[in-house]
Structure formats: C-alpha cells, structure tokens
Image: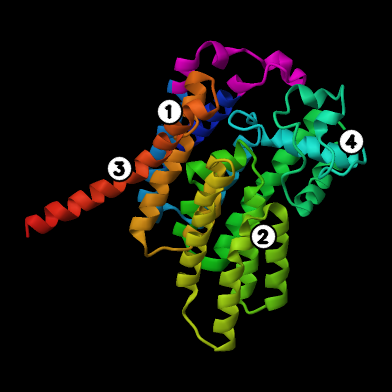
Amino acid sequence: MKKIIYFSYFLLLVFFSFFSYLFIDPNLVYLKNLYTGFVFENREVTTLLYIVLVMAFFLGYSQILKNIRMIDISSLKLLIGLTALILVFSYPAFLSFDIFNYIATAKTLFFYGENPYLVMPIEFAGDPLLLFTHAANKIALYGPLWIGLTSIPYFLSFGHFLTILFSLKVFIALFYLGTIYTLWKITKNVFSIVFFAFNPLVVVETLMSYHNDIVMMFFALVSFYFLSKRKIFLAMSFLIVSILIKYATIFLIPVFIYVLIKIVKREKNYWDNIYLISAILMFTIFLLSSLRVEIYSWYGIWFLSFLSLVQKRKTILYGSLALSLGLLLRYIPFMFFGIYDSSTAILREAVTFFPPIFLYLLIILRKFVWAKNT
C-alpha cells in the first residue's frame, strides 16, 4: 500500500511538472522551442486537466495523511526531497509571473544600478525581460532584504536568463526545505511536517510558482523557534528579517510582545495557543489583503505555516485544507475565460470560499443530525 501511494505521488508530480510547460508565455523567447500554444487554443481542456490534477493532488495528500503512521523518517525525507527535486524542473510561471518580476527587480538594481523603489523595469526600453514581465510598470513591491537576497542567484547566473531562472528556483526551494526543517525543530512531530510539506497549495505556490512568501515564513518560524528557546536577540533579529522580506509578518509583533511578557512572568505551556493566535493573525491579514488589491492564493502559506504547529484543533485544520483547495481552484475562471479582471472577480471569490463553507455546513449538519438521533 505504501509503495503504491509513493509511486502514485511521484507520477502525479511528474505529470504536474509536464503540464506546467503548456503555459509557457508566447513572448518568452528563451523557451520559444517549447511553446505549443495549447492552453490558449484549448481553454476548456486545459481547465479540466488542471481540475483533475488538483483533485488528484488533494486525494494523494489525504492518503498520505491517512497513512501517516506508515511513514518513517527516512521515507519522509525521501518524499520531501523528491517533491523539491522533481518540481524544480517545472515551468515556474504557469499560475503566476512573479518570478519574472523578481528577476526584473534584481536586474534594475544589480545591472542598471538604479533604485527599484524609484525606477520601474519598463523604463529600460529594449530590455528582453519586458516582453514577458507582467508587472514591469510597477516599482519594487517587496522588502529590501528580499531584493538583497536575490543578488545571490543573480550573480551566480552571470547574467544568463535561464541560469538565473533556475538558480532562483533552487534558491526558493531551499527555503521550502529550510521551513520544513524548522518546523521539525519546533515540533519533532511527523504530522506537522506532512501537513505542511505536502499540502498541495504550499507545494504548487512554492515549488511551481516560486513565491517568496516561503522565504518570509521561514525567517518568521526561525524567529519563533529562538523565542521558544528564550534567545530574545536572535528571535527579534529573525523577525525583523522576515518583515523586511515581505512586510506581512509585521502582524506577528503583538504575539512576540505577548510571549516576552509570558517569559518575564516565567509562565509555561502556552505555545499551542501562541501558534494558534499567530495563525489567526496571519489569516486576518490574508483576508485584509482583499482591501488593497485582492486575495492571492499563495498568501495561504502565511497561516498554514503556523497551523501546521496546531495539532489539536481538527476542525480548523480541516477548514484550512478545504480553503487550500479553494485557493488552488481560484485560477479556474482565468484558465477558462482567459480574463483576469473585475468581470470574473465574484466567480473567483465563490470558487475560493465554496469548499470551506460547504465543509463547515456539512459539519454543522452532521452535529445536528447526531444530536437529533441521541
């Protein structure tokens, strides 16, 4: 049974990786030989394939969770390693073009020598990146430390686009592995690792779309690890680093102060509540993001990182999995209609929140029926 689950999961990752290459941008001259135009000419088929792959991913994920007692540490390491290794070869912009924005911002600073908070990539007329970078008309959206970190893959690439693209993918994948290791250091619990590491939303948005949210959450979790060890200076330092990656973890400052008060009072056994409160705060800013622009699927990584540390709140965990499904299905309207504007906004929200709402209605109905029969 275990071998069947592992082999099926391996095949799913391979299929998903191949599927991603159907989404190659027609203007991406560096991969023009791989461009097929399939997704633009067969939107119905593409959407159906995506739904099938996502549902299969969640089915496989549920089987791994269901058979978690069969998973030993060696198998867990192998599965995590294979996940990162296989998907690092996927096309990194089939659901989002953010990785191109990272490269364009890095090039603005390190090649052109301009301030990316003042100068937009679109101002460099003739740059080939402008052909496929979809937010070239914006200044840098991320923190200065993230831009600084991108210097590592940028300079390792020696200016070659495909090299920097692959280097950046590997770079972010390392933070995925680092986040998992940090979770293990905090909990020493296999469920926490499986819950986070194989969550399809986390896997797709981190290892296929390569969003820097995993980098932000890595430093946040490291901060909490040191805080639990009462190493205050290191904890504060890593939290500041996290905030300077993508700002969202500034919402964790009240929790940090609350823990410091607990430490001063020499109280114990409060960490389960701390992780839950942190998850709630990150979920709050996840919802509030809709006031600025909209909710983006990869923002789910914010609260899932802390929910993986909360093991006793099964209803909340189930709800987060249902929302993870909804967030991946959020891409369906764009795939089907080829439009990403206000005309499909309501449909995107409906697709996103239907799974968790439906789940909680089932839970309420089940409790009502059970109470009626007893």
SS at badge 4 = loop
Q: Earlier in the sequence, mark 2 or mark 3?
A: 2
Please say whether residue 46 is one of the residues in the magenta stretch.
yes
Q: Position of residue 341 (x, y in %)?
A: 55, 28
Amino acid marked by disc 4 = Phe
Nearer the camera: disc 4 or disc 1: 1
Amino acid marked by disc 2 = Phe
Q: Residue at x 50, y 56 (%)?
A: 284
Q: Earlier in the sequence, mark 3 or mark 1?
A: 1
Q: Earlier in the sequence, mark 4 or mark 1?
A: 1
Q: Position of residue 250 (x, y in %)?
A: 64, 61
Q: Which residue is mark 3?
A: 358
SS at badge 3 = helix
Q: Position of residue 352 (x, y in %)?
A: 43, 38
> Is any part of residue 79 visible from this angle?
no
Q: Residue at x 79, y 50 (%)?
A: 149
Disc 2 vs disc 4: Cβ atoms closer than 8 Å?
no
User: What's the CA distance linking mark 2 and mark 4?
Assistant: 28 Å
Q: Quadrant of residue 218?
A: bottom right
- Which label was assigned to residue 219? 2
Q: Which residue is mark 4?
A: 158
Residue 98 appears left or right of 122:
left
Nearer the camera: disc 3 or disc 1: 3
Q: Position of residue 70 (x, y in %)?
A: 40, 52
Q: Residue at x 67, y 60 (%)?
A: 219
- Which label was assigned to residue 51? 1
Amino acid marked by disc 3 = Phe
